[in-house]
Image (tube, helix red, strand yellow):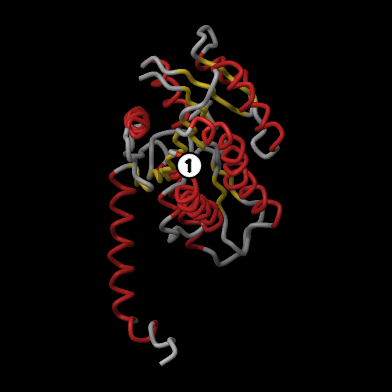
Amino acid sequence: MSKVWFITGASKGLGLNLVERLLETGHKVAATSRKKESLIEKISDKTNNFLPLHMNLVDENDVKRAVKETVKHFGTVDVVVNNAGYGIGGAIEELQHNEVHQNFDVNVFGTLHVVRNVLPILRKQKSGHIMNIASIGGFVSSFPGYGIYCATKFAVQGLTEALQTEVKPFGINATCVSPGYFRTEFLSSDSMQDGKKTIEGYDNVREMLNQHSNVIHGNQAGDPAKAADVFIELAELENPPLHIYLGSDSYEIANQKIEKLNKEMQSYKSLATSTDFE
């Protein structure tokens, strides 16, 4: 069944692969990017099923405009994919206020802007599906040098959990998608920035940043084309999951944390539960 999709960060990576696959399978797509021209260049606009849109994610008024243009063009919105975001590398002590603030503005508040502006449409029609793209780093943050990025994705996970409980009575679904490593441009300098300040002694941070840039980049196990098929299948489910850990690596890392957390909770259960009034 053909649906209307609204996808942010659609000019590259998982977003671009999803847009291409959706158009191949007959869906209607409103795709946003900081540069509308890049969408037209990569996808073309020679079809009524595709609406390329410039959108400044951190400007809520601009987000509102893009959503209105989508509804004007297609009549509605059925599936929303909050894919836009970027990473920032550097120790928590190293990253400066403006660097941290900007990462939260895009990854968290940008997602929130979209959610707030599509919900009136979805509530009115009593249907819809919002998929927020987090990361395995939104559940496991043991990556030196990526603490701030992980913090933004932890926020996306929490936001999505709360969202699901609030909008389920309206017939709206919410899913938090947490990918592992997919072979996209995400680890390139365009999407993964390093902080300007470095502090001597953070050797584990430098090692992790170097590994991501020079070892993992280009060798990721995940196939973004197969990820696109998963998004489409999720949108067809009557009761989609709240969380899905996308990719064998993400799935395994999440399981390892769950097992470790269970063991830790059992080890300290008597101490942790000793606080109640008797």
Left/right placement of residue 21 relative to residue 105 reads left
**Direction bottom: furthest residue:** 278
Rendered view: 16 above or below 147: above
Residue 142 in which image quadrant: bottom left
Q: Give percent across and percent down for residue 276.
A: 43, 86
Residue 45 occupies which quadrant of the picture? top right
Q: Quadrant of the N terminus?
A: top left
- Quick one: SS at disc 1? strand
Q: Position of residue 83 (x, y in %)?
A: 50, 36
What residue is drawn where x is 47% and y is 52%?
157
The three-letter amino acid code for the residue at tag 1 is Asn
> How busy is the neighbourhood of tag 1: few (under 14 within 10 Å), some, or many (20 plus)?
many
Q: Could you tell me which residue is drawn at 64 percent across and 29 percent down?
A: 34
Give left or right: position of 49 versus 224.
right
Q: Which residue in the protein does label 1 denote?
A: 132
Q: Is residue 250 above or below residue 122?
A: below
* Relative depth, front residue between 226 and 109: 109
